[in-house]
Amino acid sequence: MSKAKKHVIVGNSAAGLSAIKVIRKMGDHGPIILISAEDCNAYSPVLTTYYIAGQISRSALFLVDDSFYRKFNVQTVFGRMVVEIDPVKRIVHLDDRSKIAYDDLLIASGASAKPLDNVDPGASEYVTTLRAISDADKIIRAKETAREIVFIGAGLVSLQTIMAILGRGVKITLVVGSHQILSQQMDAEAAAIIQKMLEAEGVSILFGRGVDQVVMKGDCAYVITSFSETLPADLVVVGKGIQPNTNMVENTEIKIETGILADDQMRTNLEDIYAAGDVAEGRNTISGQMELIATWSNACAQGEIAGLNMAGYSSKRQGQFRENVTTILGVSAVSIGISKPGQGEFKELSYIDEKQAVYRKFFLDGPKLVGALLLGRTEDAGVVRQCIASNFDISSWEEMIAMAPLDFGRILCGHDFWLSHFRG
């Protein structure tokens, strides 16, 4: 009987937890050591804006309690960072100079928010990102007395944080480097619908600007834009994207591009070392290109695949592509696969109803659906995703799907397409 493998997992979030559960589910009773830089149980960064808004308690952020680690027989090493990996000796080195040996290793160390450059030391206490609980705590403390808040970057994190703060009498200014909001998720037409809603709530948006400096004058911070505008700020929230936490492998032979390169089994180029979650760069099944897909659902799926292979069950990741589901000012928004022009030569089908804040666009490669952007009417998002993942031929009704989401599922079930809800 072969000796049970010693599994070491770096990262205590979606990918790491998913790997732990599937390793045990497959009957692997080998030791699992979980290393996390944060000194607490696993929590969901996705929920931090709900915490900021007061919609959930701080304790509700946590995904598991101590019993999870006991149930799955996991040895935890919290509050310690992995500073180096020795693939030859199969050892990870921690920041307290301790060492942990492994038989196989999963790097699920996630990503960090990109910081803002050129912040004067005196102004740094007024500047934050939103990635950790400590960031959310800082925003909550500041918003109680803040009169003016400046957001840098107009991605999902910034917009969700703005929604959590709206209605408190705070002046909000959004500084955007591009010429539209949500430039990574939407095309200009869909973004314009959200923009109008934000402006109706009193949010000032400055497009085409960078930030030259954040300085301290008196008891207030000021954001100096590339247009030489001076914006007073009791708080500056930076939402400029993320950067994978790859420092621990930078002096090894593990291959890195944006993130750690991993194949469809979530294996790196080195034996018995896996990568999953926001730190991993995997193959996008639509484009065929290696890509960092930093979403919670993708991290969970990648962690499961890594865990299966670590437990000795060969498995590959399938249907890996970008997908985001969120709500902005009460309007649901879903992007799946290809969600904006410029990502390839695809046929586009679209429908728009600005009064109802409805925008639906589909991208087709021949008879196959490869992407969708749904705003306002998202009832069929699950069916759309399945069509994309399974390469379903939709040619027989492709001209209908933009307008009629409610009956999309009926077609897949073999029923007649019911058009009465939009006839006349």
Image: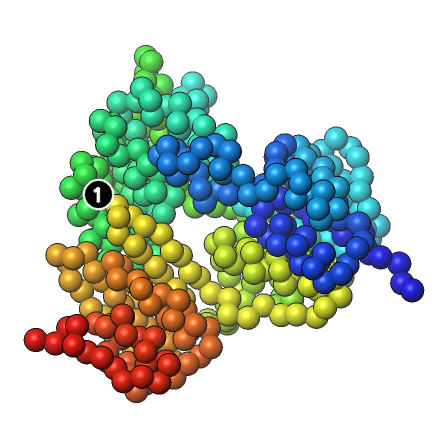
Please name the residue that numbered disc 1 is placed on.
Answer: 198
- Residue type at mark 1: give it: Leu
Question: Residue at the left extreme?
Answer: 424
Of 119 and 405, the residue lying toward us:
405
| Number of residue marks | 1
User: Left or right of 244: which side holds 80?
Assistant: right
Q: In which quarter of the image is residue 261?
A: bottom right
- On-image quarter of the C terminus: bottom left
x and y, in percent, of residue 331 in the image: 26, 52
Q: Residues within 10 Å of mark 1 (few under 14, many from 20)?
A: some
x and y, in percent, of residue 105 in the image: 73, 53
Which residue occupies 79% across, 35% down?
Answer: 98
Q: Quadrant of residue 190?
A: bottom left
User: Left or right of 362: which side holds 139?
Assistant: right
Of 416 and 287, the residue lying toward us:
416
Question: Residue at the bottom extreme?
Answer: 396
Which residue occupies 89% across, 63% down?
Answer: 2
User: Left or right of 232: which side holds 213?
Assistant: right
x and y, in percent, of residue 375 in the image: 27, 59
Which residue occupies 41% across, 81% down?
Answer: 392
Question: Residue at the top extreme?
Answer: 218
Q: Is residue 153 visible?
A: no
User: Left or right of 227: which side holds 273?
Assistant: right
Against 320, is 408 above or below? below
x and y, in percent, of residue 59 in the image: 51, 33
Q: Can residue 29 be seen in this view?
A: yes
Of 66 and 377, the residue lying toward us:
66
